[in-house]
Amino acid sequence: MSRNTQLSRRFFLRGLGTAMALPALEAMLPTSAMAKVGTKIPLRMGFAYVPNGAIMPEWTPNELGSQFALSPTLQPLAGVRDKLQVMGGLDHAKAAANGDGAGDHARANATFLTGCQAKKTAGADIRIGISVDQVAAAKIGHLTKLPSLELSCDKSRRSGKCDSGYSCAYQYNLSWKNESLPMAPEANPRLVFDRLFGNGMPREESESQTRRQRHERSILDFALEDANRLQRKLGYTDRMKVEEYLQAVRDLEKRIEKSEKGEKNAAPRPKYSRPEGIPSDYGEHISMMFDLMMLAFQTDTTRISTFLLAHDGSNRSFKHIGVSEGHHSLSHHRNDEKKIAKLAKIDRFYVQQFASFLKKLKNAREVDGSSLLDHCMIVYGSGISDGNRHNHHDLPALLAGGSAAGLKVGRHASFKDVPMTNLFLALLDRMGVEAEALGDSTGKLADV
């Protein structure tokens, strides 16, 4: 218990250019509210997108209901199986051509969170629709430091010609504030880190960053006096929780610094220069971005986040798991068993990254002792099902967490011809956001 200390849920540790939100503490609730603490914990909503579909026979469990066995691709999720829903039969009909010809990869990205048909253009007259995350941000974003957080492992693009006459804006952005304005995701973990823990005052933040780089100091150094003063007022449980949180922040900061130093010392790459601060190791890059999403949720810096792990059509190779060919090239496998086996390895790699993120959410504790994952609703999936055929029905989709909001975790559910946007409407409803429709939705998915 706290030592008669009452903190606001939006309390920050402050220093030069620094404003660090804290995780949920007992001291943030009056004693009389402790018995009802569950009603005080915010619900978060996140989306993670992977490209080029999946090998569905390796993805889909054989059994329905709560007694399902994890499929080969989903095996890495064994530690969070009880917090998970495998959801089959969800569609994105607006990602199909519908008379617009080729361009399934651009449409898959653009439609995934909007449920709208992208206008086929490579010019400035792009048009799609508002995405589910931004519907939520418009209603509840004012409650947190950041209305929403957009992440990617690809540098954002807002113009240029990409897939079959579609603007690159469709393919490199997942979140849309309105029908013509994408919310550009950030791929540099250093910039995301500074955004989460900066105080919003550019001059102070710049001075803080300069001092850190010059003297190899941590962002924690600038908030240390505030942290020490707070710790003296907290009870044992809260002190341990704050120390654990600060250590997690510092560990992530060290990983980012190590990545930056590695990039600066690396030999020049022909024809391609990775932006400073972005790890050369793709798995580590994904892990950093998921960790940043977790810290943002844990500290209630935002309750809404999207993560584009790679744009659809990405032709990245995965030599570290024995796949030297490009992902997109392999996805046109034409039933070649060797190519299918390699694609399944890529699918499993992505699931492993997601599983690691979910395990960290599961192990993080809220003020009442419940799992942070119980208070998060995380959708993971792709806008394409079979990459060889470019189809957009029966998409690979997972829904993790949300038991505190009444979601039916620990099961494999299968639907038929149900728009993915029906699921999104149901999640908005759990977030307390009223929305009559989203894209091609036909109503809220009841069985969720």
Image (cartoon, rainbow, N blue to C red):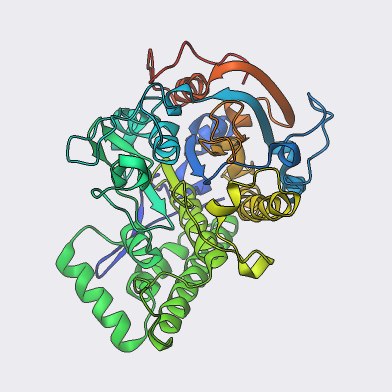
On the image, the x and y values in percent for residue 93 come to 47, 22
Question: Between 31 and 371, which is closer to the camera in this rendering?
Answer: 371
Question: Between 70 and 95, which is closer to the camera in this rendering?
Answer: 95
On the image, the x and y values in percent for residue 242 come to 51, 61
Q: Residue, x 35% and y 39% (percent of image)?
A: 175
Q: Is residue 202 left or right of residue 52?
A: left
Q: How many marks?
A: 0
The correct choice, above or below, for 268 with respect to 315 in the image is below
On the image, the x and y values in percent for residue 230 come to 41, 62
Which of the image's four quarters has the C terminus? top right
Q: Quadrant of residue 265?
A: bottom left
On the image, the x and y values in percent for residue 113 come to 42, 32
Q: Is residue 324 left or right of residue 12?
A: right
Q: Residue, x 68% and y 32% (percent of image)?
A: 86
Q: Is residue 432 left or right of residue 204?
A: right
Q: Residue, x 58% and y 44% (percent of image)?
A: 372
Q: Residue furthest left?
A: 203
Residue 234 visible within the image: no
Residue 141 visible within the image: yes
Question: Between 34 and 330, which is closer to the camera in this rendering?
Answer: 330
The correct choice, above or below, for 35 with respect to 313 in the image is above
Q: Residue, x 32% and y 73% (percent of image)?
A: 222
Question: Between 431 and 418, which is closer to the camera in this rendering?
Answer: 418
